Image: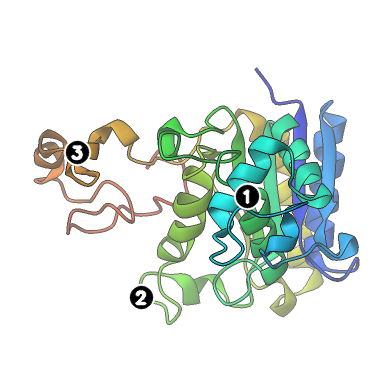
Amino acid sequence: MAAKRVLIVYAHQSSGSFNAAAKDAAEEVLAAQGCTVQVSDLYVMKFKATATAEDITGEVKNADHFRYAEETNLAWEEGKLCADITEEQRKLTEADLIIFQFPMYWFTVPAIMKGWIDRVLTLGFAYSQEKRYSQGIFKDKKAMLSFTTGSHESMFSSNGINGDMNVTLWPLQNGILHYCGFQVLAPQIFWAPSDIPSEVRGTMLEGWRTRLQGVLGEKPLYFTPLDCFDREKGYQLKPEVHEKHATKEFGLTVGIHLGLALPPNNQMKAGV
C-alpha cells in the first residue's frame, strides 16, 4: 500500500540552493501523487542542535549526573519533553516516508540535522534495547538520505581519495536509520552540483523527479536481520549464519563483512 504521509527533514541555509530545489521537487512530485507532505526546514525553524537538560520541562531525575538518553526517555513517558521535540516526534509518527535532504558536511549530516537526530530520536520513542534494527520501532516506515556532495563521484569510489561512499554511509544508514527500524531506501546522491554546468544540474533534478514517481514502492537496502545474532553471546553472528556465508566472495554487508570483500554498492543500491 502506497505511503500517503511524507516528512522531509531539510537542512540548508539558502532557498536558492540545489538542496532547496531537490526539496521542492520532492514536495511537488509527492503531493501530485496524493501524499500529504510536511517539511521541517531546520534553519528557518532555528532548530536547537544541542542535546541538553533544557529539552525537559520541569525537574530532571538526576541533575548531578545528567544522562540524556535516560532522562529524555523518562520525560517522553511522562509527557515532559519540550515542545519542539514533541512536535517533530508527532510529524515522524504520522509519516510513512521520511526524506533527509542536506548537503554532506565532513562526510556526514550538518550539525543542525545531527541535532534533530540526537534530540528527536529519543530512547523509548525511537528505539529500545528490545526494539531496534530489523525489529525496531519504525520497521513499518521508510526513510532515505538525499544529499549533495562537494566532491565528484570518482573521489568517493573504492580507489578514490575520499574512500568508498558505501563505507561513509554505513554509520548514517545502519547506525541511525536501520537502528531505529526504518526500511532504508537507497540514497539519492547529487554529486558535486556546484562544480558542474547548469544543464547537468537540471538533468540531475529530472532524474530525482523520475525516481520520486515510484519511490513509495521501492525495495529497501539489505541489512542483516537481528535474529541472525546471538544476544546471549554479545550479539555475535550465530555460528550457522557465519558458516553459511564464510565461503562466499563477499561479506553480508559493509559493516558485517566477516573479513571478506565488501559487497559492492550494499549501501547504495537495493537488491545487492
Q: Which residue is drawn at 80% across and 36% down?
A: 30
Residue 159, label in figure: 2
Residue 232, label in figure: 3
Mark 3 Cα-neighbour bin, 10 Å: few <14, some 14–19, many ≥20: few
In the drawing, does residue 111 fall left or right of residue 226? Answer: right
Mark 1 Cα-neighbour bin, 10 Å: few <14, some 14–19, many ≥20: many
Q: Which element carries disc 2, helix, strand or loop?
A: loop
Q: Residue at x 40, y 63 (%)?
A: 167
| Residue 119 place in picture, x, y as percent | 67, 55
Could you tell me the amino acid type at mark 3?
A: Glu
In which image quadrant can residue 132 be found? top left
In which image quadrant can residue 13 be found? bottom right
Q: Nearer the viewer, mark 2 or mark 1?
A: 1
Q: Which of 16 and 132 is in front in this view?
A: 132
In the picture shown, does residue 113 fall above or below 70?
Answer: below
Residue 72, label in figure: 1
Residues under numbered marks 1 and 3 in contact, where contact means CB atoms less than 8 Å apart = no
Of mark 3 and mark 2, the one earlier in the sequence is 2
